[in-house]
Image (cartoon, rainbow, N blue to C red):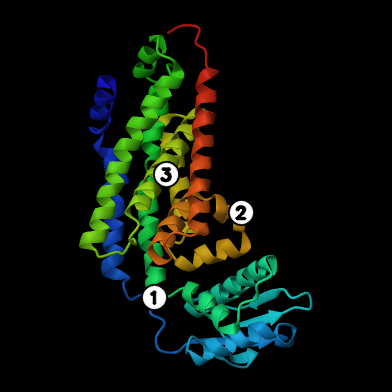
Amino acid sequence: MHNLILEIQRKTRNWALIFWILVFPLILTVLFRLIIANAYTTASSPAQVGTLSLNNDPQLAAVLDQLETEGIITLVEPEQADAVLEVQDDGQLVVHMDDNGIAQTIITAIANQYQQTRALTEQTGILPDNSQTAYLVERTMPSNKSLIYINYFTTLAMGCLSSAYFGLKAINDLQANLSEVGKRLACSPEKKSHLVFKQVLSNNLICMSLNLIQILVMKYLLQIDFGTHTGFILLTTFLGSWLGNGLGMVVGGFLKLNYNDKSNLLTAIIMLGNTAAGMMLPQIKYLVRLYCPLADALNPAALITDAYYQLSFYGLNGTYYRLIITMAVIGLLFYLLTLLILRRQRYASL
């Protein structure tokens, strides 16, 4: 325990890492709050939807009629539409659009949610009436609030994934050919599994504490709603730090580069992951999910963002549990790979 406390004290003196985990994401969050709070307002006009071959799916026609009645969409001729929904002969719903924007994102979300609902009802054999299906579609389509919250939650995901810098520093300290600390640890009688566990525990305690500070600022100063499930917010934050640390340790252990090059590579991975999760433009997230669902499903930034998003808008559900299980499994694989790398290392002299 004494060694663990000393390890935490040593790492908390690294102000550069603390800046990237806490200060920089907070600066981005405040800027989002000040600058883009009204950037995604869709004005008073609903999305213009065109349709083709709706006779192949009467249920979809009924749903669209209800959404039009509620002012969510307006059914127009295909030539005048923001996007066109076509039901093919095999029952597949296809979205045709010539541009990307808020209206197209809303229409794409409606189509995706409708297909998911139909697939679920076919599996269970329970066909909901039109009003139930319309409600399921409506509550998951992007709104002004939901699009802005994607920006907020991606900055929080960036803070969690920036824990990778602590993981990179930890793996550097565990390798005798890379640091003086590594030489001393290699000479110690302590097992490598214990050394890795100590690094992982100290890193996650520090990073989770920093991420919790960011959550408190977002929740109480910026009035960002995380939902009422405090325990699961803490769990999501821990798993986000868990993923970030593991990512840094794997990159640091696998690649034969100098420390600065590894750090620059981590920065590129984190920024690319957050961009794909919707930080710069929320519509990118829906496009990635539509055209490359596997990349979205394995993107750590998207997993963290979606977990917070689910808690904020929908509470606990099957999607949230799937997300946190995926985060836990990917993080565990990172640490097992790290331990495997360290166990295979041998030094002729120190």
Q: Amino acid at mark 3?
A: Leu
Q: Position of residue 176 (x, y in %)?
A: 42, 16
Q: Is residue 13 above or below residue 92?
A: above
Q: Position of residue 348 (x, y in %)?
A: 50, 7
Residue at the outermost left position:
221
Q: Amino acid at mark 2?
A: Leu
The residue identified by callout 2 is: 294
Judging depth in this view, the residue of 176 and 76 nearest the camera is 76
Whether the residues at callouts 1 and 3 have beta carbons within 8 Å, the answer is no
Q: Position of residue 275 (x, y in %)?
A: 46, 57
Sequence-wise, the earlier of marks 2 and 3 is 3
Residue drawn 48% across the image and 56% down it: 320
Judging depth in this view, the residue of 295 and 225 nearest the camera is 225
Residue at the outermost right position:
89
Sequence-wise, the earlier of marks 1 and 2 is 1
The residue identified by callout 1 is: 144
Q: Position of residue 37 (x, y in %)?
A: 31, 72
Residue drawn 65% across the image and 70% down it: 121
Q: Secondary structure at mark 2?
A: helix
- Image-based side of 2 in relation to 54, left or right: left
The residue identified by callout 3 is: 239
Q: Splitting the image into 4 quarters, where does residue 227 fall? A: bottom left
Say which quadrant the N terminus sits in: top left
Sequence-wise, the earlier of marks 1 and 3 is 1
Residue drawn 40% across the image and 9% down it: 189
Structural distance between the alpha carbons of marks 2 and 3:
20 Å
Say which quadrant the C terminus sits in: top left
